[in-house]
Structure formats: structure tokens, C-alpha cells
Amino acid sequence: MSIGRRNFLGGAIAAPLLASAAEAETWQEKWNRELLEDFAMLGRYRDANRKLLDAKQPVNVVFMGDSITEGWKDKRPGFWTPGRINRGISGQTTAQMVLRMVPDVIDLKPRAVHIMGGTNDIAGNTGPMSPEMTRDNIQAMVALARHHGLKVILATIPPAESFPWRPGLQTVSRIRELNAWIRGFSRRGGVTLIDYDRVLATPAGAMRPGLAFDGVHPTEAGYDAMAGLAEPALARVLGRQRAKR
């Protein structure tokens, strides 16, 4: 799942978004090579993290996620006020996110982390993944954050009727299953939940019209709907006056 500068969707290419089959193959090869050379893509934010630490800039919250997180910065840059750090990487599964928790989140010493992932687990971008594997990875990220004194905000997986880069894959039931678990886990563990599905999904489990440009990745309007839930959650977790530092 990917957008923006890379113009490819996760581990497999969504051909309609590319000029030709040859271009799709080129991007597929690039993705495969990157998985071999730097599976978790730890190098993606290495320089940015170093600069942030050198500047001693206070960090309120780090958003850990995939392309839905990464694309938020391009579509709605005004949301990213000082102290809010975006560490989304297009195409990533929760297995990769776990490996990035220390360098891309904990080392930045934020007060909180916003975790949203699972779409690409269902798509199998890094190989087949069961719901149990996704649950384990989410629990591991939450445990790491809490061990280091971070407050945790856990988001539901945004809806999707299908994935353009995985034709024929049944997505709705699998997203609903994981979201039901995320809601229950958040409630049982005292984790702050943001249920984006509530404002993004149709009754049938697809993205509402106008909120995604490909049925998966939010438009500006989609991110506005998400921000409508994120802002009050950040205010509660961080304190109303400090949330927008």
C-alpha cells in the first residue's frame, strides 16, 4: 500500500496507477530488493531522526504506520504541527513496524505514540500473515511503548472493499475481524482508541464516497474526517494546551 513519490502500492503493484506492465515490474523489483537489503526500512528516517534529536526538539506524539499514515502529511500538512512526527512508510506490515519502534519512536522520546497498521498484513505484502500474527505485533508495539513510559493511541484499520494491488482478495471480513479485536484489546488494556472506521466506512465495509481516491488511501476529505477524531484524542492524552505544540 503506497502513495506519493513512489507511485506503487505495497509489495505488489496496482497496475492501473502505473503507465505500463514494465513499469509495474520495475517497482515490484525495487520493493523486493528493498525488503532484502533493509527489511524494516530502518534507513528511511535515520537522517531525519538524527536531526530531530540533535535539535533537541520536543516530541509530543509519533504516528507509526503505513501509507495511510505517510500520506497524511502530504494531503493535510497543516495537521502536522510542531511536536507531531510522522513515521509512516508505504507498504509496511506490522512485522516491519515492530522493528522500527525503537529507532523511529522510542529513541525520539515522545510523550505518546499513535499506532495504525494491519492493512498490508491482510494484503500479505511481506508474505502470508494470520490475524494472530497481526495481533501479536500490535501487542508487542504497545508493550514496547508502555515499557518506555509512552502513552498509547491505537487506531482501527481503515475500511476497504478491496485492495487494488491484490485483486480478488476478500478484505471486508478480515478488516472487521481485526478491528473488533483492536476495540476489545484497547478496552481491556486501557489503551486510548481512535475508531477511524466509524467515520470512514459504509455499512457494507467500503470507504465512503469521496473519502478515498482508490478505495483505500484517504483523500483530503478523508484525512479531515480522521483529524476530527484524532484532535480530541490527542487533547485528552497529551493535555489540551500541550497537544498542538
Image (tube, rainbow, N blue to C red):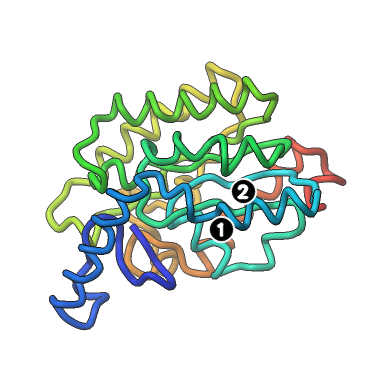
Residue annotated with mark 1: 225
Q: Residue at x 18, y 56 (%)?
A: 166
Q: Quadrant of residue 18?
A: bottom left
Q: Position of residue 125 (x, y in %)?
A: 26, 48
Q: Is residue 10 above or below residue 76?
A: above
Q: Position of residue 76 (x, y in %)?
A: 60, 67
For label 2, the SS is helix
Which one is nearer the viewer's eye here, 85 or 235? 85
The image quadrant where one finds the N terminus is: bottom left
Q: Is residue 152 above or below residue 22?
A: above
Q: Quadrant of residue 223?
A: bottom right
Q: Residue at x 59, y 62 (%)?
A: 224
Single out the residue that lies furthest toward the top.
188
What amino acid type should be assigned to the residue bearing mark 2?
Answer: Leu
Are the residues at dot 1 and dot 2 in contact (C-beta closer than 8 Å)?
Answer: yes
Q: Quadrant of residue 151?
A: top right
Residue annotated with mark 2: 229
Which one is nearer the viewer's eye here, 102 or 62? 102
